[in-house]
Amino acid sequence: MKIDPADAAEILPVLVRIACALERLAPPPAPPQSLGSADAFVWHAASGWLEPVAAVNRVELGLLCGIERQSGILLRNTRRFAAGLPANNALLWGARGMGKSSLVKAVHLAVCRELAEAGRERSLALVEIHREDIPSLPRLLALVRESAGRFIVFCDDLSFDGQDAHYKSLKAVLEGGLEGRPEQVVFYATSNRRHLMPREMIENESSTAINPAESVEEKVSLSDRFGLWLGFHNCDQETFFAMVEGYAAHFGLVMPVERLRARAVEWSMTRGSRSGRVAWQFIQDLAGELREVSGFALDRIS
């Protein structure tokens, strides 16, 4: 088909404008990824980009009181993984505010420091993936599969509700898929639910399915993909006091112990619970009060 030169002269400007409009609508290409640029990243599924995190919001491992057993288990598992030894996926589940996500970040920091002190070249990166981006996990694993480093893929507050079928894709990626999990990747997740799903969701499946036992097995089999189950439970008052006093000592807050405890109890009663998060919130309030009086400064952590 031949186009008249006069018609082509009229059509060409229109085509140029269309091409320019499409370029404006299209997302810019992601820059070349350098996975050695940081030891922590956030996964952006829409663009397929790992964003380096310059300063991770975390607390020192030694400040996490009341969860020493969980800390020891996760630290040993992470050390083995960083050394290239077999290691398990880990599910940290249980009471809110008891340091589940803080422990993952603190253990990562502790192991990175040990690697640096030992002069090892092996790197260990923490990669955060949001719950809603779980379907993009295969793309993330494909991105890191060829890397020389090792990666902890971390999902905070992981859970599934209603007809959410994303748990099936996570099951396949963790253990059941053809490729499976790359040997240089381990998956850590936190959740308030041991089986990552509400009890009523599992019970509804059991009551309505043709084969209730098989239906329930499918729902709870996701948590079985995690070799480590670390439970976190509400702390007693003595543990709560240990948390408060540990924070106060670390940051140099000077106050008689009995008065500090009385203030902490009063604060916990206004929140209706005792936990590491409540203890930290109390310390932040106390530090602000003391700063008003004496100019005391407290770096923000969580």
Image (tube, rainbow, N blue to C red):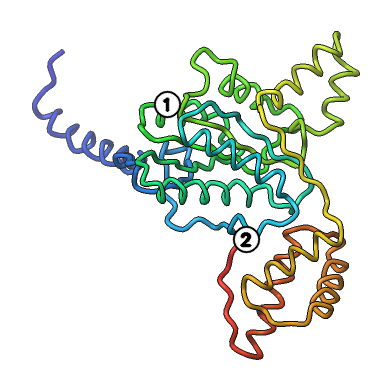
Image x and y of residue 161, in percent: 75, 33
In the displayed image of the protein, which residue is found farthest to the front?
Answer: 118
- How far apart are labels 1 and 2 at the CA level? 32 Å
Circle 2 crowding by C-alpha within 10 Å: few under 14, some 14–19, many from 20: some
In the displayed image of the protein, which residue is found farthest to the right?
Answer: 207
In the displayed image of the protein, which residue is found farthest to the top?
Answer: 210
Q: Which quadrant of the rendered structure holds the C terminus?
A: bottom right
Q: Which amino acid does label 1 sit on?
A: Ala
The answer to whether mark 1 and mark 2 are in CB contact below 8 A is no
Which of these two is toward me, 185 or 41?
185
Q: What residue type is labelled 2?
A: Ser
Image x and y of residue 261, in percent: 83, 73
Q: Viewed as shown, does residue 300 lie left or right of 10?
A: right
**Residue at the image point whose x is 84% and y is 62% from the top:** 238
Residue bearing mark 2: 302
Q: Viewed as shown, does residue 167 lie left or right of 198?
A: left
Instruction: State whether residue 210 is above or below residue 281.
Output: above
**Residue at the image point whose x is 87% and y is 31% from the top:** 200
Instruction: State whether residue 248 is above or below residue 55.
Output: below
Residue bearing mark 1: 142
Determine which quarter of the picture holds residue 205. top right
